[in-house]
Image (tube, coloured by chain):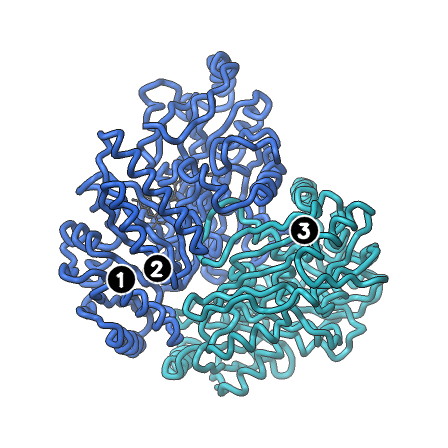
Chain colours: A cyan, B blue
Amino acid sequence: MSTLVPENENQAIEIVKDAKARRQPLAIEGGGTRAGLGRPMQTAAILSTQALSGIIFHEPAEMVIRARAGTPLAQVEAALASKGQVLPFEPMDHRGIFGSEAEPTIGAVAACNISGPRRIRNGAARDSLIGVRFINSAGEAINSGGRVMKNVTGLDLVKLQCGAWGTLGLLTEVTFKVIPASETEGALVLEGLDDTTAIAAMSAALGSPFEVSGAAHEPGAPARTILRIEHFSSSVDYRLGELEKLLSKFGRPRRLDRQASQALWRNIRDAASLNEDRSKALWRISVAPSQAPQVITTLSDKGLTFEYFFDWGGGLIWLSLPASGDASAVQIRAALSGTSGHATLVRAPLELRQSVEVFQPQSIAMMKLIQGVKASMDSAGIFNPGRMYAGV
Amino acid sequence: MSSILFPKPDPGILARRDEIIAGLTRLLPSECLITSEDERRAFETDALTAYRRMPLAVALPRSTEEVSALLAFCAAEGVKVVPRGAGTSLAGGAIPQEDALVIAVTKLNKILDVNYPNRTVRVQAGVTNLSISESVMPDGFFYAPDPSSQLACTIAGNIGMNSGGAHCLKYGVTTNNVLGVRMVLMDGTIVDIGGDALEAPGYDLLGLIVGSEGQLGIVTEATLRILRMAEGARPVLFGFPSSESAGACVAAIIGAGIVPVAMEFMDKPAIAICEAFAKAGYPLDVEAMLIIEVEGSEIEMETQLARIIEIAGKHDVQVVKESRSAMETALIWKGRKSAFGATGRVADYICMDGTVPTGQLSHVLKRTGEIVESYGLRVANVFHAGDGNMHPLILYNVNDPAEQEQAEAAGMDILKLCVDVGGCLTGEHGVGIEKRDLMRHQFTEADLAQQMSVRAVFDKDWLLNPSKVFPLEGRNAA
Ligand SMILES: Cc1cc2nc3c(=O)[nH]c(=O)nc-3n(C[C@H](O)[C@H](O)[C@H](O)COP(=O)(O)OP(=O)(O)OC[C@H]3O[C@@H](n4cnc5c(N)ncnc54)[C@H](O)[C@@H]3O)c2cc1C
């Protein structure tokens, strides 16, 4: 398959127009790190954002950065770090999951709404993405949002693009709100809690005034429930102390210093504990925290064997199991019925992704809206067709 | 006064008014349907009171199912619909038109569920913003977006406008705090989008709906995030000799890695107006004032305030006033939160809402003063300095049509300026009818056509709040 690498927006527009005229669907690619995520696509060529690269501006005092879509995430993070800032939502690095050595791009972070543990406190990528520029299938460059964080002018197409996995156009520029990096961080680790008790402990911590910025639980021997505080150093000490008191009925937690906390949360962010055997299927399940233990119990009761852990205070379940059959898709989604939870098959072999819906199937009414939105931006059906849903 | 145009009412609908009302009567009991001229008058306008239109009728449904029946009926009959919450929109977002049915959700005013472990509430869309916080406050929680109108405005309207508030620098605006909605589409279909999980599957339709100004459907229920209140909150008040030094101080605070919960700016005229009203102890001899609020424990607040005060010291600060008690805190905020009301006692005003990159604040303030002066009017500025969301209040006399026109023209010039320096037309009040005709200043034809074609997915016949947001001419481009 050929790879098209436009060096500027005009070239990208020409490529899109040409693809439309020839009805040749394009697979949009940033670094290619996450190429293995999604339904397999029938595309004629890869449209790469690699050469649409570079930071357009970073205004630390305005807490905003704009970059071209193909800019390596690492470059964005380094530029921010040089001014003591970070992306608020702590985007996860998928390379571990997929065993990829490619370079993740900031455009893909936007397109796939990639967040991490700090999402429970600071929102997802979608909450910090304040502007996009994209090319629709008519070959028009469209702006939505801008560079200011308060903006309600017109329909918010930024949100639509964020998490559309490239099915609604080619992002060429993205603008994110950023925040100061916290001075330091620390964590508490409670040991030996079962799932239900762990969720209760995390809910207590997240319902406290101490602005917990990470809450995860790893079952096992011993199970670990981990809570993070990021702040000025005096506040971190104080808040960890208060949390210890608050959580005393759950046990006596161990404290982790900055370095240990950082290492641990990087692993949680990247679901590193489920990476040892990449032949296994990996599910990402979003659910209300209080329902998470029940989902796990239901799956165990059905006799499934799997490994898992909770992030987001229980609102996110990472679950890995053998990639045989349907990778338990039917059972996992059945366990979620009656909740507003949903499951995404993040990692699975190609054949499996051909037969199992990767993204949560939608109701007929919702599907109609999704198809309508797709047609309104990609009437030619040339951007990542079928990656999320058949015909979309 | 009539510089903003309304489309001509559809004579076919007006002629069929009796028949349409008869149809509505079959769907709703009489106490939920307002048809008399006297009673309809209460719904003629919103907080953009210079404009008013008498609606065809007003429906006050009590359930999602009733909303569904109403919309299905209107779709079949080709009747336009204007969704309405409390009618506090400053942009004319809820102003009716003669050939439209107003559907107001104010009877849908129950809090359905509070879930502390998940930190969510589920509410009917007509509950007021403040009542949500009030219901969870005894347990130490709150709903973060806090528009100054929070006593009156509804969650439905907040979702319609993606409303903000003084504390959104830290906590975000409505779109960052809504997890799900139940919404009725124009054909009557009921959809649940999102829910009590942090993320919804598929496209982020929720993000599209928030801020869509009643053009995509009628929201009847919402699931919202609630947060635990900080241990304490304390504002400090600074007086500066110029808005430049105040602006530089804001930038320096952020540069030092501190993001306060709120950073509110007032200029000299605004200080005078608010002080006269609230007796908050604002300094009257400074050119600019900042209210900066921090949160945390006693010690944390003290440490943070000390750092902030130190920074302010490097920016020519003239007056530093730390709140010493809950009462002082309440007073300081009372002055700020009543800014619009207090201004209303002095003169009629129109409130602009553009956002600018914070680096441009001083420049835009200066130009705003010059613009308003060139129209022979006065302006007071109150705004959210941390995020650049300006609120110039242009003072005029509503009974003087010429002056009103001048005021509007000045407002439009200011909004164009906001766009020209890299900002936008509206940071939290919405486009409504007020800024509709400026949309082409911010967006290209292609941008607007793209938005309109997305809109059409939800409402292909343009029946929902059709005269808002998009310029009236050139719509068939979509
Ligand atoms: C004194 C004053 C102070 C204010 N302060 C602030 C402030 O600090 N921050 C801020 O952001 N705003 C502020 N506002 C503006 C206004 O209060 C907000 O826009 C508010 O969200 C409107 O809510 P409402 O219930 O009055 O809605 P309405 O004015 O009735 O409607 C607002 C919009 O939402 C749509 N809508 C209403 N109900 C629904 C529904 N069920 N489904 C779909 N769409 C619907 C309407 O069609 C309309 O477009 C202020 C207004 C006043 C008068």
What type is the residue that disc 2 sits on?
A: Leu
Q: Which mark is residue B243?
A: 1
Q: Quadrant of residue B321?
A: bottom left
Residue underneath mark 3: A168
Chain of the residue under the numbered disc 2 shown in the image: B
Residue B115 can be seen in this image: no
- Looking at marks 2 and 1 on the same chain, the residue that comes earlier in the sequence is marked by 1
Asked if the residue under mark 1 is in contact with the one under mark 3, i.e. CB atoms within 8 Å, the reply is no
User: Viewer-nearest of labels 3 and 1?
Assistant: 1
Residue B164 can be seen in this image: yes
Q: Indicate the position of residue A189 as horizontal and vertical percent values.
A: 52, 82
Is B236 above or below relative to B146? below
Q: Are marks 2 and 3 on the same chain?
A: no
User: Viewer-nearest of labels 2 and 3?
Assistant: 2
Using the numbered discs, state the Cα–Cα distance from disc 2 to disc 3 in whole angstroms. Answer: 35 Å
What type is the residue that disc 3 sits on?
A: Leu
Using the numbered discs, state the Cα–Cα distance from disc 3 to disc 1 in whole angstroms. Answer: 43 Å
Query: Is residue B408 or residue B191 the one in the foreground?
Result: B408
Q: Which mark is residue B361?
A: 2
Is B342 above or below relative to A233? above
Q: Indicate the position of residue B387 as horizontal and vertical percent values.
A: 39, 60
Chain of the residue under the numbered disc 3 shown in the image: A
Residue shown at 29% from the left, 36% from the top: B406
Q: Indicate the position of residue B213 as horizontal and vertical percent values.
A: 47, 40
Chain of the residue under the numbered disc 1 shown in the image: B
Q: Looking at the image, which residue sits at the far front?
A: B374
Name the secondary structure under disc 2.
Answer: helix
What type is the residue that disc 1 sits on?
A: Ser
Name the secondary structure under disc 3.
Answer: loop
Asked if the residue under mark 1 is in contact with the one under mark 2, i.e. CB atoms within 8 Å, the reply is yes
Using the numbered discs, state the Cα–Cα distance from disc 2 to disc 1 in whole angstroms. Answer: 8 Å
Query: Is residue B221 or residue A109 the one in the foreground?
Result: A109
